Image (cartoon, rainbow, N blue to C red):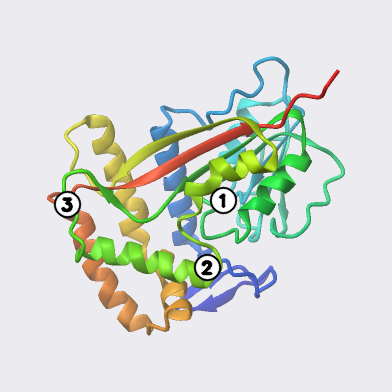
């Protein structure tokens, strides 16, 4: 499948009008795999928090926005009895897969037309990618078997700080605000994860649970757990600021690529400064479709 090129990066070519703003080239694929490692560290080695499969084996699971497919591959390996489907706009997944896993190129914002139901629907880091999360949760609800679970794991903006070392005029704070402004212009707010819990409840889910983790911007924490998270978070965000920001700032805010890179150099400096004790909220929200009435 052909890709399109913009400012030296490649992007999906599936329905180019779709407002998905992240590249799909090798640098972004490496970042996605690193990000998978960061999430598993965050969750203590777990792929998910939902209490799935405790009573019965799962028949089918959906990885919505699978990216490189790394989560889906790990999940399929851990659940060989489950048929796993991974969906993404870009066919960037590997060819050698577990026999119970398949990938499809499609747009999750279209009407879902699956001829079967799922026991588990998983989505990670879809903030800024989906414009209508209430619709996403309604479609997830309808696509789940009774008793099935949906789980979203996502970052939200702006960056936070507990001790006042993140100043209002800092470049981290400026970047956070500009990311919110730009994603809002694309109709895909970077603040979406704040609303997942209520949106799941509104869609009909029960037993909805939200857990919020912290990703430090670098190795500033004294605690070894958070120090390691900060190390990988810095690589994940500061290391790929250009890919995360370029389309949003050029198309959304009207900046030139040169203006973006000059600004991001200052943001990177702040993100490496251990005197700035900033962190990103990471929301893990999961809920259950009610069991069928007997």
Give the crowd class for mark 1: few <14, some 14-19, many >=20 residues within 10 Å: many
Classed neighbour count for the residue bearing mark 3: other residues with Cα under 10 Å, few (<14), some (14–19), many (≥20): many
Instruction: Left or right? Give the position of 108 relative to 173.
Output: right
- Marks 3,1: beta carbons within 8 A: no
For residue 220, which quarter of the picture? Answer: top left
Residue 256, quarter of the rendered image = bottom left
Q: Position of residue 34 (x, y in %)?
A: 42, 46
Residue depicted at 45% across the width and 72% down the height? 248
From where the camera sits, is residue 70 visible? no
- CA distance separating discs 3 and 1: 32 Å
Label 3, secondary structure: give it.
loop
Percent across and percent down for residue 206 are 65, 30
Q: Nearer the viewer, mark 3 or mark 2?
A: 3
Q: Which residue in the structure is indicated by mark 1?
A: 68
Q: Callout 2: 10 Å neighbours few (<14), some, many (20+)?
A: some
Say which mark, if any, is on residue 21.
2
- The answer to which of 78 and 219 lies nearer the viewer is 219
Above/below status of 98 relative to 53: below
Q: Quadrant of the C terminus?
A: top right
* Cα–Cα span, label 2 and label 1: 16 Å
Q: For this rendering, which residue is in front, 144 or 228?
A: 144
Residue ID for mark 3: 276
Farthest top residue? Answer: 55
How far across and down, in percent of the image, does residue 10 sit?
A: 53, 71
- Mark linked to residue 41: none
């Amino acid at each position: 499948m052909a890709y399109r090129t913009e400012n030296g990066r490649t992007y999906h070519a599936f329905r180019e009008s779709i407002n998905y703003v992240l590249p799909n080239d090798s640098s972004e694929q490496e970042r996605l795999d690193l990000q998978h490692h960061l999430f598993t560290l965050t969750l203590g080695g777990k792929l998910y928090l939902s209490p799935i499969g405790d009573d019965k084996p799962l028949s089918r699971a959906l990885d919505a926005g699978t990216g490189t497919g790394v989560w889906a591959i790990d999940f399929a390996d851990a659940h060989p009895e489950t048929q796993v489907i991974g969906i993404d706009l870009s066919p960037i997944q590997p060819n050698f897969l577990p026999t119970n896993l398949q990938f499809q190129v499609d747009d999750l914002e279209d009407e879902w037309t699956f001829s079967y139901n799922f026991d588990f629907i998983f989505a990670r880091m879809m903030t800024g990618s989906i414009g209508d999360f209430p619709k996403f949760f309604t479609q997830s609800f309808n696509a789940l078997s009774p008793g099935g679970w949906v789980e979203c794991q996502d970052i939200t903006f702006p960056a936070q700080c507990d001790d006042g070392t993140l100043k209002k005029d800092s470049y981290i704070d400026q970047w956070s605000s500009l990311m919110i402004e730009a994603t809002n212009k694309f109709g895909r707010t970077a603040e979406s994860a704040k609303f997942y819990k209520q949106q799941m409840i509104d869609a009909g889910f029960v037993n909805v649970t939200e857990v919020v983790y912290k990703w430090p911007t670098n190795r500033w924490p004294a605690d070894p757990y958070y120090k390691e998270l900060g190390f990988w978070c810095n690589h994940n965000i500061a290391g790929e600021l250009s890919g995360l920001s370029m389309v949003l700032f050029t198309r959304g805010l009207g900046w030139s690529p040169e203006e973006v890179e000059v600004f991001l150099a200052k943001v990177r400096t702040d993100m490496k400064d251990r005197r700035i004790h900033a962190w990103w909220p990471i929301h893990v929200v999961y809920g259950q479709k009610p069991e069928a009435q007997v």
